[in-house]
Image (spheres, coloured by chain):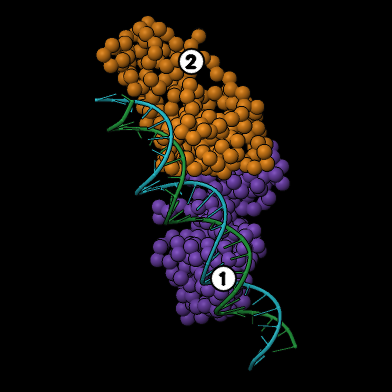
Chain colours: A orange, B purple, C green, D cyan
Amino acid sequence: MGNSLSLTEENYIKAIFQIGTTPESNVSTNALADSLQTKPATVSDMIKKLSHKKLIFYEKYKGVALSASGSKEALKIIRKHRLWEVFLVNHLNFKWDQVHEIAEQLEHIKSSELVNRLDDFLGNPTIDPHGDPIPDAKGRVQLGPSKLLSEMTSHEKGIIVGVKNEDPLLLQHLDKINIRLGLQIEVTEVNDFDQSMQVNLPDLGIIFLSEKITSQILIAKNS
Amino acid sequence: MGNSLSLTEENYIKAIFQIGTTPESNVSTNALADSLQTKPATVSDMIKKLSHKKLIFYEKYKGVALSASGSKEALKIIRKHRLWEVFLVNHLNFKWDQVHEIAEQLEHIKSSELVNRLDDFLGNPTIDPHGDPIPDAKGRVQLGPSKLLSEMTSHEKGIIVGVKNEDPLLLQHLDKINIRLGLQIEVTEVNDFDQSMQVNLPDLGIIFLSEKITSQILIAKNS
DNA sequence: ATTAATTTTTAGATTAATCTAAAAATTTAA
DNA sequence: TTAAATTTTTAGATTAATCTAAAAATTAAT
């Protein structure tokens, strides 16, 4: 403790956390370079630094994984990111496709007092505008089980609870076709060839969705 | 344009602006080093960089002053700082003595959309929690009633608080003769025939101004 | 199981921001 | 008006984060 992370270090920790969500294998140097839009050589260097600070586990040529303190840091950053997104959408009237970039900056503001007061001000929300869960002050994440719309079969019903990524083009498109969190959705037909779907939405009726879209939409598993 | 300032550059510009608010002379290298908690040699280097970017006027051994674009940047930063302070105090229940450091971070968030929406959300406040005026979206600070420089008489003193119009040619000319907002000005002589003036400015000493220019410059009325 | 392809690391430079120490210019004072 | 004191600048290094090019290790393929 004592030493707070640089902006760059925070971005590495966050990227490792996000790539690592399927932790069967360690996060590779190239994957990190891709995610951070930098070069593998740069990643190699930074990895050594983070390893030295015991934020990650690292063995040459074997990739990296977050340590306990690394995970804690990652969750703090993600908590801030998502809380700020709630603020931007709920109080400053931004659309869900406009907040990611601004939150990328706000997530690095250092003050736990600020984060916790913001949390209270917002009413301690549990999900952000894209349906992603917001870790609490202790880093605990509350996520109900979900599956991808693309994994559903004909005649299945479910509630839209999230969007897998924050690409503004995707979000704007979903806006345009009136898809948003909380809607009930029913798969009416699945096309075997390209996995495109016809789905039934409350007021809109039946619309067509490509696999590129259905693979980004999260549906509550139980309900 | 196109070039956005680094965090360090922003801090220099802001420091120059703030030291310059009591401007009898240009801002000295040592004063900046003090204010920024750094060494004079470092300041010397950075000064060259900012001068090269035309954000400040600089002559070796003569200190620095902000250019028009430098002042504009400073006001943007100060606007953000003060608006965030209002947010922290009015909505997150911070005390007025707790917000400076957090606002020092928040002032560097880059999104004019964000600042303007925040401004609206806060109800377009004109002063921050410490009573300092908040510049509006165009960088104008509301310092109470003002009059035109051209309406002043001999020996009157005042503070320059604005320029009546945004004609680039006028503003470029004012830059060139080092006239900028915040300066104290004293009318030393008025020419009855054409209303031209001689005025005394902090560092520059006495300069001559035509009525075409004095009729564009706003001076604080009371003070 | 070698060879080929890919991934990862090292080596050596570069840029921004900083420092210390020394030189140069300006200001103050005797 | 010279000399002393102060301020400012230059010169040369340092650190963090980055890059390119080349070497080393791992993985995949014939």
Q: Nearer the viewer, residue B21 or B58?
A: B58
**Residue at 48% in and 18% down:** A161
Mark identifier at residue A146: 2
Instruction: Say which element carries label 2.
Output: strand
Q: CA distance from mark 2 to mark 1?
A: 62 Å
Does B44 sit above or below residue A45? below
Residue B137's x, y, as percent? 50, 49
Q: Is residue A219 left or right of residue B132?
A: left
Q: Is residue B203 left or right of residue A156?
A: right
Mark 2 belongs to chain: A
Mark 1 belongs to chain: B
Residue A124's x, y, as percent? 62, 26
**Residue at 68% in and 41% down:** A2
- Is residue A97 visible in the rendered image? The answer is no
- Of badges 2 and 1, the one in the foreground is 2
Q: Amino acid at mark 2?
A: Ser
Q: Residue furthest top?
A: A155
Which residue is disc 1 drawn over? B63
**Residue at 53% in and 33% down:** A58
Mark identifier at residue B161: none
Does A130 sit above or below residue B220? above
Q: Quadrant of the N terminus of chain A?
A: top right
Q: Nearer the viewer, residue B141 or B219?
A: B141
Judge the density around disc 2: few (<14), some (14-19), many (≥20) Cα neighbours within 10 Å. Answer: some
**Residue at 51% in and 41% down:** A46
The total number of labels drawn is: 2
Residue B155's x, y, as percent? 62, 77
Q: Amino acid at mark 1?
A: Gly
Residue A95's x, y, as percent? 46, 31
Image quadrant in which you'd find residue A216:
top left
- Is residue A184 visible in the rendered image? The answer is yes
Instruction: Say which element carries label 1.
Output: loop
